[in-house]
Image: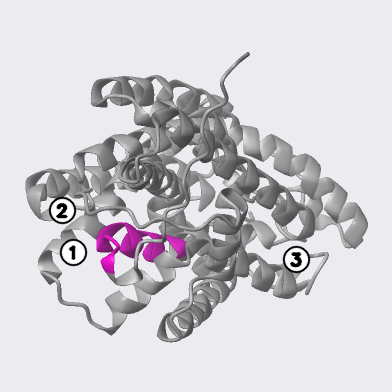
Amino acid sequence: MTQQPEPARATAPTALAERAVAPDLARGAMLLLIALANAHLFLHGHPVGVRGYPADGSTADRVVAWVLLTFVDGRAYPLFGLLFGYGMVQLARRLERTGTTVTATKALLRRRGRWLLLLGLLHATLLFNGDVVGAYGLLGILFAGAVLSDDRRLLVSAGVWLVPVALLGLAMGAPTGPDVTAFFPSMGTTDPLAAAGWRVVEWVGLTLFYVLTLAAAVLGGAWAARRGLLTRPEQHVRSLRTGAVLGLGVAAAGAQPLALMATQVWSEPTVLGLLLAASLHLVSGYAGGVGYACVAGLVVVVLRGRRGVVVEALVATGQRSLTCYLAQSVVFVSLLASYGGGLGDELGVATVSVVAVLTWLATVVMAVLLARAGARGPFERLLRRLTYGPRPAVRATPYPE
């Protein structure tokens, strides 16, 4: 008879004041990048150009599109992946400190991944086809064991997984037809039920795409967590500086061919040039994700324990990142979607980016209010209850992360 692994013991949540600052700070700022990266996807009724940006924008729209493609688009999600992998290792270490076996830890990570996958499906069905929660759930299921590997294996595996990033990046440069007026069919569908059907189909394809293109980020984040790059940033200042400068520099330079094509400065690229530019953009986005994570670590070092209003607000947002991420979709659908508020056919990239910033600010305010009330995010509480069940929690013993 096969012996079943013992269930992982529910650890008491780390007190918010005791959590490492840099990962939460990065998550809070990352949500601004996520909002900016997603908002233009809700535009419809415009000819679709490179990477889903409208081809008929004003000068202001083109300038904003250049900024987004250089610093945000394809850079935010690798950062998201790095932080997800980092968090998986932190959770595994907390379980280790309660005496949980490796087998039971893997089982819990996979159970958590299954609930994230289901939550992602519900998010896509009800609101947004571009949901990434389900993809991270699937990555958690697939890599529950891999993130616990040794440093060398994690780095080698992350490097191998960059190959599909480069190959799938080519697909991002595929030209769209002249009559296409929405990047996804669901975004141009006004019937709510039909749009929901389209969203589920699109979500399946996008989830597989995210898994293949973000696996390297998750494994890289696990490697960074094992070395404590963000939990002990003061010990890695030189590495963080190098990562920030090189990462953001490579990301900005690698974005230029596609950014210039999207803004029609490079007005008549060949199909091959477009495909290669899209691949370069996606691969260089990994460097941007690394760069942004390193900046968060350096900010914590500079602060030396001091926290102003802005840092406290960003940290509070990062501690409730799942709730804040889902709240963005509620706002975008209510205002922009063809199957919701419908304003996406009246706005351009510049104005919809303003909506994205205001939406992010609203979630920051929500997170601060929750923090002042001593409350965690509702979806963070829900995920914890689904993952651990109602078993009593055990406080993990102190251990440097």
Q: Is residue 57 above or below residue 172?
A: below
Does dot 2 land on a helix, a strand or a loop? helix
Q: In the picture provided, is 138 more to the left or to the right than 251?
A: right
Does dot 3 land on a helix, a strand or a loop? loop
Does dot 1 land on a helix, a strand or a loop? helix
The answer to whether the residues at label 2 and label 1 have Cβ atoms under 8 Å apart is yes
Q: Which mark is residue 337?
A: 3
Q: Residue at x 30, y 20 (%)?
A: 153
User: Residue 344 colored magenta?
Assistant: no
The residue carrying mark 1 is 300
Q: In the picture provided, is 370 more to the left or to the right than 217?
A: right
Tell me where the magenta segment starts and ends, as one range.
18-31
Residue type pointed to by label 3: Ala
Could you tell which of marks 2 and 1 lies nearer the N-terminus?
A: 2
Q: Is residue 26 above or below residue 164?
A: below
Where residue 181 sits in the image (x, y, percent)? 76, 53
Residue 317: in sight, yes or no? yes
| Main SS of residues in magenta | helix
Q: Is residue 5 above or below residue 254?
A: above
Q: In the picture provided, is 10 more to the left or to the right than 340?
A: left
Could you tell which of marks 2 and 3 lies nearer the N-terminus?
A: 2
The answer to whether the residues at label 1 and label 3 have Cβ atoms under 8 Å apart is no
Question: Within 10 Å of the Cα at label 1, are there few (<14), some (14-19), or many (20+) other Cα atoms?
Answer: many
Residue type pointed to by label 1: Val
The residue carrying mark 2 is 233
Where residue 365 sits in the image (x, y, percent)? 47, 83
Residue type pointed to by label 2: Pro
